[in-house]
Image: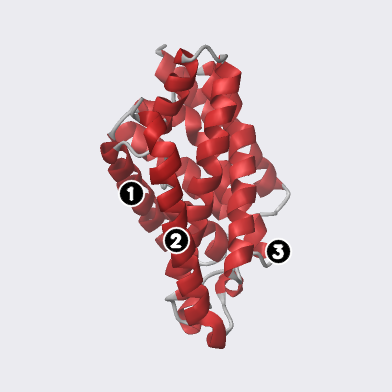
């Protein structure tokens, strides 16, 4: 049995146990109560993979491969978001590189956290979306750091370059991974959440109502334009911060 296949089995088992528990306890019924959930999931997977591959080609020290996952988490619910994240990495591992498979639990955690935050009303204004992105970053770091340590600091994005640089400076693997996550995760997940927020801001209330949890993304009509502008400006600022402070680390 190859190591890649073993990693896949372990990742699927971990996510399967959580989703199985949610199914048995009937916590995911609303998420999958509409056909719109099943329509959106493959679209979201395509968004994740296409943007994720673009980031890899450009060797950016971020991920941005979870925008679709966040969209599903907000519109359909946390468990649908978790399934979308897991399936995205599973499909990417088949099409491109099995190196995506160990990160299936992280991708599922992102969708789950996004959905839970949205259910709590944290996808209504730009600053709450920033908080959501930060919480997603914390959750992804908690789940992803042990995986990164086991893999020697290798991840499915350009952030591995930062980890490698830190290792060359004499830092330990755990310290290098945590430092990389501290630098990358908040910028990435806040940007991801704000971009998803911007997409949702452009959808009509009638269309949003077709999703199981469309109310999570219904904004005050009088504030939609200002919220969109602030969200996009914040993303631009985060991109500039990445270019100025994070990218130079990858060039050393």
Q: As drawn, which residue projects farthest toward the bottom?
A: 222
x 58%, y 36%: residue? 182
Residue 172 x/y as whole percent: 57, 14
Which dot marks residue 120? 3
Residue 68 x/y as whole percent: 43, 55
Upstream in the sequence, badge 2 or badge 1? 1
Residue that label 2 marks:
195
Question: Where does the C terminus fall, quadrant-wise?
Answer: top left
Above or below 120: residue 78: above
State the separation of the CA atoms marked 2 and 3.
Answer: 19 Å
Question: Where does the N terminus fall, quadrant-wise?
Answer: top left
Residue that label 1 marks:
51
Above or below 115: residue 155: above
Residue 153 x/y as whole percent: 48, 21
Upstream in the sequence, badge 3 or badge 1? 1
Q: Residue 112: in sight, yes or no?
A: yes
For residue 180, side relative to residue 215 (left or right):
left
Residue 132 x/y as whole percent: 62, 56
Please state the total of marks drawn on the protein image. 3
For residue 129, side relative to residue 243 (left or right):
right
- Marks 2 and 1: CB-CB under 8 Å? no
Q: Residue 37: in sight, yes or no?
A: no
Upstream in the sequence, badge 2 or badge 3? 3
User: Which numbered mark, 2 or 3, is in the foreground of this view?
Assistant: 2
x 41%, y 62%: residue? 39
**SS class, disc 1:** helix
- Marks 3 and 1: CB-CB under 8 Å? no
């Amino acid at each position: 049995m190859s190591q890649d296949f073993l990693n896949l089995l372990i990742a699927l088992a971990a996510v399967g146990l959580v989703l199985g528990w949610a199914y048995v306890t009937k916590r995911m019924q609303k998420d999958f109560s509409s056909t719109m959930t099943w329509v959106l999931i493959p679209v979201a997977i395509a968004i994740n993979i296409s943007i994720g591959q673009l980031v890899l080609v450009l060797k950016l020290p971020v991920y941005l491969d979870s925008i679709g996952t966040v969209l599903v988490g907000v519109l359909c619910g946390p468990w649908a978001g978790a399934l979308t994240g897991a399936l995205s990495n599973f499909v990417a591992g088949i099409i491109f590189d099995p190196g995506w498979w160990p990160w299936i639990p992280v991708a599922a955690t992102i969708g789950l956290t996004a959905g839970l935050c949205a259910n709590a009303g944290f996808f209504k204004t730009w600053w709450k979306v920033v908080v959501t992105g930060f919480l997603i970053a914390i959750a992804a770091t908690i789940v992803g750091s042990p995986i990164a340590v086991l893999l020697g600091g290798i991840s499915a994005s350009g952030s591995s370059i930062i980890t490698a640089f830190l290792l060359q400076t004499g830092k330990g693997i755990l310290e290098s991974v945590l430092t990389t996550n501290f630098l990358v995760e908040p910028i990435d997940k806040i940007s991801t959440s704000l971009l998803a927020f911007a997409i949702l801001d452009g959808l009509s209330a009638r269309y949003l109502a077709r999703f199981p949890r469309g109310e999570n993304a219904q904004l005050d009509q009088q504030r939609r334009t200002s919220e969109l502008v602030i969200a996009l400006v914040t993303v631009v600022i985060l991109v500039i911060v990445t270019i100025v402070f994070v990218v130079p680390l990858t060039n050393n």
